[in-house]
């Protein structure tokens, strides 16, 4: 019989599933080495449409085995619209959901006793995504400035990345110039290529700790 983990985190994809435990470990949170021993079960939705699906959210909120449920999503280009989409999907089951997402992330307790939270990458207010958040953690050195300039120059020379993926292009180019080249995002956190002590990282981890009581 499948064990139901009482603490669940819904995310858009597998990058978040790999990065978040490494961020937690970097801040002194012992996550657990295996999926069945992890302190939080991370469930990737394989896309924002699935994550925001009203029926899916209804099923997750009404899972009798849960005590804590979180959602992490990307703001992408229109943070207000992204929050409104989640609000519309959740409010039939969470009538006390605030109309505006707090800057420090949402944490509320439902009538059922379920502790429910939302974090919108990168900082609950700005446009962007997971890679935008991780870009905050890149050391502000000459290489990072050079990387950003060259990524823009590459676009002018015919690079086909979409404008809203600029943050992805920046950080993956920066990681391509490390030793060895091409680190995965979670490895960049684990191996301290990114600055784990950046204030933005601390704000996110404060939300995670408070929501899941860890």
Image: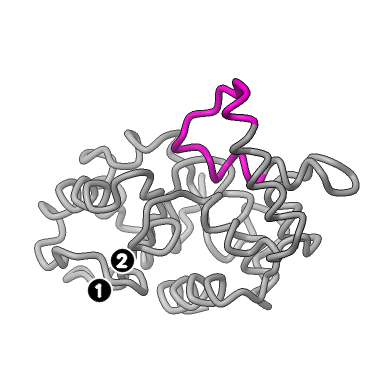
- Image-based side of 206 in relation to 80, left or right: right
Q: Are marks 2 and 1 in contact (CB under 8 Å)?
A: yes
In which quadrant of the rendered view does residue 135 lie?
bottom right
**Residue in the image at 25% along x and 65% along y:** 101
Q: Check the image and report above or below for 116 versus 4.
A: below
Q: Secondary structure at mark 1?
A: strand
Please report the residue visible at 58 percent of the width from the left and 29 percent of the height from the top: 155
Residue drawn at (53%, 58%) of the image:
133
Relative placement, left or right, of 54 versus 167 is left
Q: Secondary structure at mark 2?
A: strand
The residue singled out by tag 1 in the image is: 109
Residue 53: x %, y % from top left? 26, 38
Q: Is residue 85 magenta?
A: no
Q: Which mark is residue 202?
A: none
100 or 55, which lies in front?
A: 100
- Residue ID for mark 2: 116
The magenta segment: 154-171
Seen in the image, is 134 located left or right of residue 176?
A: left
Q: Residues within 10 Å of mark 2 (few under 14, many from 20)?
A: many
Residue 177 position (above or below residue 210): above
Q: Is residue 198 above or below residue 118?
A: below
- Horizontal and vertical percent for residue 35? 63, 52
Q: CA distance from mark 2 to mark 1?
A: 6 Å
Q: Earlier in the sequence, mark 2 or mark 1?
A: 1
Q: Nearer the viewer, residue 178 or 92?
A: 178
Q: Quadrant of residue 61?
A: bottom left
At label 1, counting other C-alpha atoms closer than 10 Å, the crowd grade (few under 14, some 14-19, many 20 or more) is: some
Please state the horizontal and vertical placement of residue 183, each as a whole percent of the image.
78, 45
Q: Left of 84 or right of it: where is 144?
A: right
Which is more toward the observer, 68 or 1?
A: 68
């Amino acid at each position: 019989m499948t064990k139901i983990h009482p603490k669940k985190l819904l995310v858009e994809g597998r990058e978040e599933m790999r990065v978040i435990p490494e961020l937690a470990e970097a801040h002194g949170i012992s996550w657990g080495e295996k999926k069945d021993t992890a302190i939080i079960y991370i469930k990737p939705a394989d896309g924002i449409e699935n994550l925001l699906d009203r029926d899916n959210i209804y099923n997750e909120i009404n899972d009798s085995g849960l005590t804590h449920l979180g959602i992490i999503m990307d703001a992408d280009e229109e943070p207000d619209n992204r929050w409104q989409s989640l609000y519309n999907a959740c409010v039939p089951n969470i009538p006390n959901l605030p109309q505006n997402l707090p800057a420090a992330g949402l944490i509320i307790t439902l009538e059922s006793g379920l502790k429910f939270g939302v974090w919108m990458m990168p900082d609950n207010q700005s446009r962007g995504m997971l890679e935008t958040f991780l870009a905050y953690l890149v050391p502000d050195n000459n290489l990072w400035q050079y990387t950003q300039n060259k990524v823009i120059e590459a676009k002018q020379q015919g690079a086909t990345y979409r404008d809203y993926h600029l943050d992805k292009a920046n950080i993956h180019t920066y990681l391509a110039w490390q030793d060895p080249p091409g680190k995965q995002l979670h490895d960049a956190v684990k191996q301290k290529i990114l600055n784990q002590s950046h204030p933005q990282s601390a704000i996110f981890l404060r939300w995670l700790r408070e929501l899941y009581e860890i």
